[in-house]
Image (cartoon, rainbow, N blue to C red):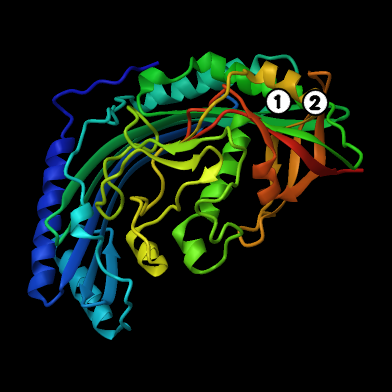
Amino acid sequence: MTQLSTTAQDRSNDELDRLAQLAEDVIRRARAAGASQAEVAASIDTGLNVNVRLGEVETVEHTRDRGFGLTVYFGQRKGSASTADLNADSIQATLEQACAIARFTEEDPASGLADASRMATAFPDLDLWHPWRIETDQAIALGKQIEDAGRAHAGITNSDGASVQMGESLAVYANSHGFLGRERGTRHSLSVALIAGDDDGMQRDYWYDSVRSANDFMDARALGDKAAQRTLARMGARQLSTRQCPVLFTPEVARGLIGHLIGAVSGGALYRRASFLLDHAGKQVMPSWMNIVERPFLMRGQGSGAFDAEGVATRDSALIENGVLARYVLGSYSARKLGLASTGNAGGIHNMIVEPGQDDFAAMLKRMGTGLVVTEVMGQGVSTVTGDYSRGAAGFWVENGEILYPVEEITIAANLRDMYANIVAVGADVDHRSHLLTGSILLEQMTIAGE
């Protein structure tokens, strides 16, 4: 695999300087045009995406995208405009459009910049910048290597292709408080999807890896092997009869459960009164042994950052503490609507970590005994308003801690309120490919609808 290098050709800091100067200049011009407050977000994203299938190149895509967004406030009237063109005429037109919009909008008592006292003042190096100097032909060769490894397994009959992606992102946020924050980060990924088939049917599965530094990728052949093993393991899948039983979510599926929790305690759902966890701050929502903590300063973390989308300083902060909902997830607008303070989560969360237990996946199977392992969920049957959860699922049936056979075409159902309260254990098998970090999660019981 081609290793990364940071060389003299890395001009990212020069690009950030240019974005910063542009942002500060536009803010000065917005103030001169009568805006009482203004904020700018500017970015440059570059990347390479190569897809190969059955040993042949399908697509090669080089990207270089620019973005510039301006928000102005005339008192508590707000106007926003954006452009993908950073030349002077486009920037001036964007400024004029934002000001025109603000002059005609209604006042909103909750609008405005985040409080000046909350702006970040420390900007530690979180080791997020690792350019991957891979040439197109090298990326193609790497994609073929991954796919070949998977296709070499007996029983793999086809492929949906392998993908190699390299990405670099430069971003600046500035506002009229005098705040200027710069961020640069890289995200690279490898993936492959394979198909197995026989007279009884076909199955498809995949695997991927996502990293900040290409040096941290799992071995390319091992990735292809894992995708093949996952695909072959699904052969001969059956339905289950309708029943109630324990359910074990694998880590990549379990993080969806945590995502639903975050959605339910986020400001937008709360001030619209569209959450089953409305008014639950300070109340028990999970078992007393559970803790979920936000850690924005993880080195090479997928969601690491010193400030949020409004410049508010991030900080380590518990979301669930001994099973109790310690706080909500708020930016300044939703916080004002609720009469609360921003939690530094405008634009999202920064590395939410479910405190892992001691058991690896095999031990989690033993702990469950007999029940369903869920490796895939489908459909949109989750309501943040009521907490109702009903989704199509696939996975494996387990008895006495051992996987017996694959399962498909079933539905799993419960209410999120009960699901969170009845978590039995969290595994040590943490999936690090996301900003939501959790191991497998074992639930006491769900309803399985099948044959």
Tell me the residue at 12%/39% (across/down): 14
Tell me the residue at 23%/80% (across/down): 100
The quadrant where residue 361 appears: top right
Query: Are the two marked residues, 1 and 2, in contact with CB atoms closer than 8 angstroms?
Result: yes
Q: Which residue is mark 2?
A: 235
Q: Choose between 45 and 63: the one closer to the eye.
A: 45
Residue 353, percent from left and from top = 47, 34
Q: Amino acid at mark 1?
A: Thr
Q: Amino acid at mark 2?
A: Met
Answer left or right for 147 relative to 294: right
Residue 421, percent from left and from top = 66, 43
Tell me the residue at 85%/26% (across/down): 236
Assess disc 2: are there few (<14), some (14-19) or many (≥20) residues with their C-alpha within 10 Å of its C-alpha: many
Q: Helix or strand or loop: what does disc 2 sit on?
A: loop
Residue 382, percent from left and from top = 66, 54
Q: Choose between 33 and 249: the one closer to the eye.
A: 249
Answer left or right for 150 relative to 246: left
